[in-house]
Amino acid sequence: MPRTTTTAATTTGPAEPDDQAARTGRQTAADLAFYARAMKAPTLLEAAERLAERAQAESWTHLEYLVACLQREVSARDSHGGEGRIRAARFPAIKTIEELDRTHLRGLTRQQLAHLATLDFIAAKENAIFLGPPGTGKTHLATGLAIRACQAGHRVAFATAAQWVDRLAAAHQAGRLQDELVKLGRYPLIVIDEVGYIPFEAEAANLFFQLISNRYERASVIVTSNKPFGRWGEVFGDETVAAAMIDRLVHHAEVHSLKGESYRMRGRELGRVPTTDND
């Protein structure tokens, strides 16, 4: 009779539920990490891990969980983007609206400042102009508003009036003035600081006029000046050019005249010879 040989079959069998769940969890985590790197979204990965337990505990839907994760990534990108825009704007110093000494700020009410801080003037492609003596907070105001604009997602460029003229003159000499004006026109906001500190020659005044004219009703400008409009003819060497420039600037603008003594000179006595104890 033929012999029957029985061979014991070795089978792996299905994985235990706990082992399968662990492997699935590890694979999901690896997949999530891979896709987050591919999307350059590191905050998304961190948020997904951090929010998972909360989503389970609070019985979020899949869509609610996804929205929460994406919100974290968008917030992080906005924050990092704001920092990049602030660096690109080339502010001479970082000064925020919150750091303003409002007890010294004269000529601008709290309500007016709060309205400016909403940045509605940028959305409306209007201008903000601050006039007043040195040290009354004009540059701080301009910088603080511009920084807030950066944080809100707007590209900003900051320079003094003299620096703007130098930039445009260099572009003119290189035969690319129009390209430069078009490039600057893509900035929702530029800041022109210290108009009036240095008088302009005719060519410089013409370049400055082109900058203002090119942005008229297209994009916003913040201007600071130590000279009232009535003396801008002295700055630009031509009353007609100055009048045309002022007309374009103030047509859609909030104009604020700041008053008072210089904040930087507060508490200092000038012109007094100090005495010694022996006198």
Image (tube, rainbow, N blue to C red):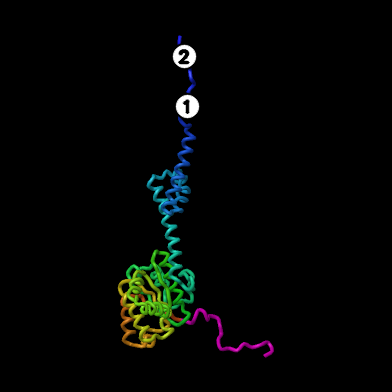
Residue 250 visible in rendering: no
Amino acid marked by disc 2 = Thr
Q: Quadrant of the C terminus?
A: bottom right
- The furthest residue to the right: 278
| Residue annotated with mark 2 | 4
Q: Position of residue 124 (x, y in %)?
A: 32, 69
The span shown in magenta is 260-279
Q: List x then y, in percent, for residue 212.
A: 34, 77
Q: Secondary structure at mark 1?
A: loop
Taken as a whole, is the magenta stretch helix, strand or loop? loop
Say which of marks 2 and 1 sits in front. 2
Element type at mark 2: loop
Q: Quadrant location of residue 116?
A: bottom left
Residue at image x 49%, y 25%? 10
User: In the rendered image, is residue 160 in sight?
Assistant: yes
**Between discs 2 and 1, the one toward the N terminus:** 2
Residue 11 drawn above or below residue 265: above
Q: Is residue 272 magenta?
A: yes
CA gap, disc 2 to disc 1? 21 Å
Q: Position of residue 209 (x, y in %)?
A: 34, 80
Between residues 36 and 220, which one lies in front from this camera angle? 36
The residue labelled by disc 1 is 11
Tell me the residue at 47%/69% (across/down). Answer: 96
Q: Quick one: quadrant of the N terminus?
A: top left
Residue that protrudes farthest toward the front in the picture: 2
